[in-house]
Image (cartoon, rainbow, N blue to C red):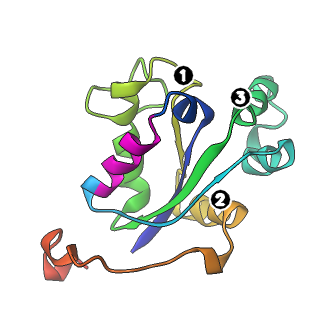
Amino acid sequence: MERTLILLKPDCMQRRLAGRILSRFEDKGFNIVAMKMLQVTPELAKKHYAEHVQKPFYPNLEKFITASPIIAAVIEGLEAVRVVREMLGPTSGLKAPSGTIRGDYSSSRQMNLVHASDGAETAAREIALYFKPEEIFSYAPTVSPWLKAADEF
């Protein structure tokens, strides 16, 4: 099983889309193994977006991500990093196809509703920024045998 971090960003929260978006990951068969609501501080934003801090767009990014509470969640499942990113669609909602989360709900590059880790190493680093190990709960839902063939686990 693979884990990835998602952040339901301020625009997602303000538009009251959190439940609809989380349900799409559950509908796909992923487990939500950790989740919390929090306010991103400027310090946490700098750690999360460390590779962007020196870029000209960073001040606006920090202002955006700290503007409202967010929901951070750890999603677990087979090929979670790749599949979750495909479910989101391209960064710009204007370029994201219908059927993807951004294609269905976003019409902006920056206000694109959800962040998802872009690789397994990034996911491990980002998960550690938002969750302590004891805040993550792996479990096997009783529906699991009906989501994947026995040899896919």
Residue identified by numbered label 3 = 64
Secondary element at image label 2: helix
Where, by quadrant of the figure, is residue 101 drawn? top left
Residue at coordinates 34% horizontally, 43% vertically from top-left? 87
Q: CA distance from mark 2 to mark 3?
A: 18 Å
Q: Residues within 10 Å of mark 1 (few under 14, many from 20)?
A: some
Magenta span: predominant SS is helix
Residue identified by numbered label 1 = 109
**How many numbered badges does the structure rendering display?**
3
Secondary element at image label 1: loop
Foreground residue among 51 and 132: 132
Amino acid at pointer 1: Arg
Foreground residue among 133 and 149: 133
- The N terminus: image quadrant: bottom left
**Residue 149 x/y as whole percent:** 13, 75
Residue at coordinates 77% horizontally, 33% vertically from top-left? 62
The reply to whether discs 1 and 2 touch (Cβ–Cβ < 8 Å) is no
The reply to whether discs 2 and 3 touch (Cβ–Cβ < 8 Å) is no
Magenta highlight on residue 25: yes
Asked if residue 48 lies left or right of residue 93, the reply is right
